[in-house]
Amino acid sequence: MEIRRDRYLNKLLLKQNNGLIKVVTGIRRCGKSYLIFNIFKKHLLESGVEQNHIIEIAFDSFENKAYRDPNLLYPYIKEQIKDDKNYYILLDEVQLLGEFESVLNGLMRIPNVDVYVTGSNAKFLSKDIITEFRGRGDELKMQPLSFSEFMSVYSGDRYEGWSEYVLYGGLPPVVLLKKDEEKIDFLKHLFQETYINDIVGRHRIKNVEEFEELIDILASGIGSLTNPKKLSDTFKSKKQKIINVNTVKKYLDFLCDAFIVNRAVRYDIKGKRYINTPYKFYFTDLGLRNARINFRQIEENHTMENVIFNELTARGFNVDVGLVPFSQKDKSGKLVRKQLEVDFVCNKGSKRYYIQSAFTIPDDKKMQQESNSLQRIDDSFKKIIVVKDVMKPRYTEDGILVINIYDFLLNQNSLDA
């Protein structure tokens, strides 16, 4: 069964033959190799590119082990280039190639060569790419399946699909498994034996138990404001352990670099400035998050917020947590400074949206509560409330769009409804 990943294919096509090395990054098992070797290759062939003008090597395959030697690989690729037509070089797990930076930079200098690579997050992270290629690499960040991609291969209705998606997530190998027990075992084993071992090995973490406990704390508090100091205090009060604030900060950076979690910083909407801390963390895949806490604490209001964040980042938005400060008189008539939160401030180019996640809005009182922060924003950018309630999209008297989670996720143009 083929899962279409048109969003990422289209992004690759925009980068095609741009003179840069296309680097596909993302959490393990999210479909990077399949994108390059199956979806993109199929497109090239259907577009008229000849098979012998596509050079593909997976360095983790035993049959290609010899090509991990740059002194063998580079001459081999050069020998395959026999005319002036475009050649497409597809390289998987490129971190296994010796001196891969020099090899890729050398290939980039061949005028009719277009290079696409993937790498594991253990040794091939965003920061590494920035450092090694210094403007010569073009990164495409890939995520697990979005809800719309998930539903394209799910046999039930959207409501059953939602329950499955927020429980087991969107990693393609998990989605294609049939039984719940298989999904649970796969997710638990993948997190422990691959993700944690990757990070521990790469960064030589000595106290693995503390590192894992930090992951569990983040998994139990998705969407909650926190910072290294607060997390350090949590260890002290609840775990009776003392962990240096700088150590916590490093651990958080490791998890972000490995694409396991994403950090959303706070933005003062009226003051037009960023606030360094506290911030929020969201898991790249909810199945992995749930596996860490043994599929307990599946509070749907928090998981829904996580899904919305992931969808917005997949659509290419820079996503922050909004802060709306205001002054209000208390009972004694004294002016008191207060602040309200907007779940997401989303920016892409000239576009901006303010989005609130509300699990349910049963009455006018709840509607007023959810829209209060949005009403206090005095610019003209669009304001949206996403709800779990099944209802048709509608606008309130204050001009706020209220849309249900299914329409928001399944319609790529939902923000412009």
Image: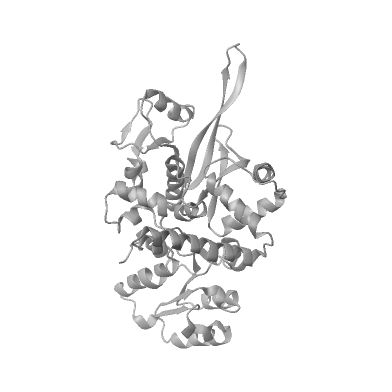
Residue in the picture at 33% in, 44% down: 406
- The percent position of residue 200, horizontal first and vertical second, equals 63, 64
Q: Looking at the rendering, which quadrant does residue 299 occupy?
A: top left
Q: Is residue 104 or residue 164 the one in the foreground?
A: 164
Residue in the picture at 32% in, 51% down: 161
Residue in the picture at 46% in, 42% down: 302
Farthest residue in the top direction? 332
- The percent position of residue 258, horizontal first and vertical second, equals 56, 60
- The percent position of residue 10, horizontal first and vertical second, equals 37, 61
Q: Is residue 212 or residue 363 the one in the foreground?
A: 212
121 vs 407, left or right, is: right
Q: Is residue 133 or residue 315 the one in the foreground?
A: 315
- The percent position of residue 183, horizontal first and vertical second, equals 41, 60
Q: Looking at the rendering, which quadrant does residue 128 occupy?
A: bottom right
State the quadrant of the C terminus.
top left
User: Is residue 27 in view from this perspective?
Assistant: no
